[in-house]
Amino acid sequence: MQSPLSDDELTDRWETQALGGSGVSHIDHVRVAWVLHRRHGRLEAEERLVLGTRKGCDHYGVPEKFDERLTRRWARAISSAIADAPDSESFLDFIARNPELRRGDLYGKPGEVPLAGGRVNPDVVRVGETVRRPMGARASFIHDLLVHLGRVGFDGAPRFLGVDDVGREIVSLLPGAPIPGTEILSDSEIQSAATLFQRYHDAAAGLPDAVLDGHETVIHGDAGPWNILWVDGQARALIDFDEARPGERLEDVGYFAWKGLRLVADGPSVSEQRRRLAILAETYGVDVDGDLLDAIEDAVAKLAAKGRAERWSNGVLTQLEEERAWQRQIRGRLR
């Protein structure tokens, strides 16, 4: 409910914690942010909103509800929405033009901590001992996959726990942290990743034939070190299954060989890449043969095709073509 106070009176009382009761409603908090931006501009408005929200939470005896990240996100969203508005626009006109700002859960809730890792789905947060993620078009397939993995005892993936009140999937929080794709993995890290992929592929291969659709297993589909949780240098679990689909085991192995081992011109020397590729292949249980080398090239080709379909920048597409050409050039030296 919106307070009957004028915009200025509401804001002045809010800044001095003189509103009484239990504080302000969500819509009045938006109104305060709108007034602060009008008075002080974007940068000062954000700092005043953060300071006032912190003081308000302390004043009303709920300091645990203060979430600086969330407050700053709201401040920036409101300032962005104001940017193209006429100076004469009232708050009622403003909120009518931006009705999504009425939703208090639009940018998450207090106590949510952003998590790193993954590339497909960046809006991932921790809530207690769970992880909340927006659901994509293939959510039901991914949920069925995670349920199956839990049922067969595979502990290298999160457990699907349901859907929260704002429509995000809930999965279990696992220990570990991802590694950027630019890092050079150690031999033991390569071996542990290969073992994790092998265990995952074995577990996913037990899905019904109707799901596998004639393929060996359900591949992860974005099998880079950024989608693995690492604990003490060991691959603990896979995360971010948004690209999972029925496929062949070598698709993930080839993709990881390319991305995880940095089989690129500015990666390790070719002789070192050959040695590291042999470690990956031996640990997983395949040969460094034409099939594996084809899988590596196919990984680049498929990502390039995806990039063209999604209209990635010319710079990225050119880089992918250069990497594919380089792999063809050194192919014979990797065996």
Image: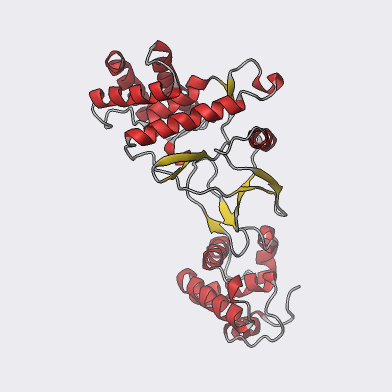
Q: In the rendered picture of this protein, how many numbered marks are placed on residues?
A: 0
Q: Quadrant of residue 149?
A: top right
Q: Is residue 95 above or below residue 48?
A: above
Q: Is residue 45 left or right of residue 207?
A: left
Q: Position of residue 287 (x, y in %)?
A: 40, 15
Residue drawn 68% across the image and 23% down it: 211
Q: Is residue 121 visible?
A: yes
Residue drawn 27% across the image and 28% down it: 265
Q: Position of residue 323 (x, y in %)?
A: 34, 25
Q: Quadrant of the C terminus?
A: top left
Q: Nearer the viewer, residue 169 or 271?
A: 271
Q: Is residue 311 above or below residue 23?
A: above
Q: Nearer the viewer, residue 318 or 210?
A: 210
Q: Is residue 267 above or below residue 159?
A: above
Q: Quadrant of the N terminus?
A: bottom right
Q: How is the image coloured?
A: secondary structure
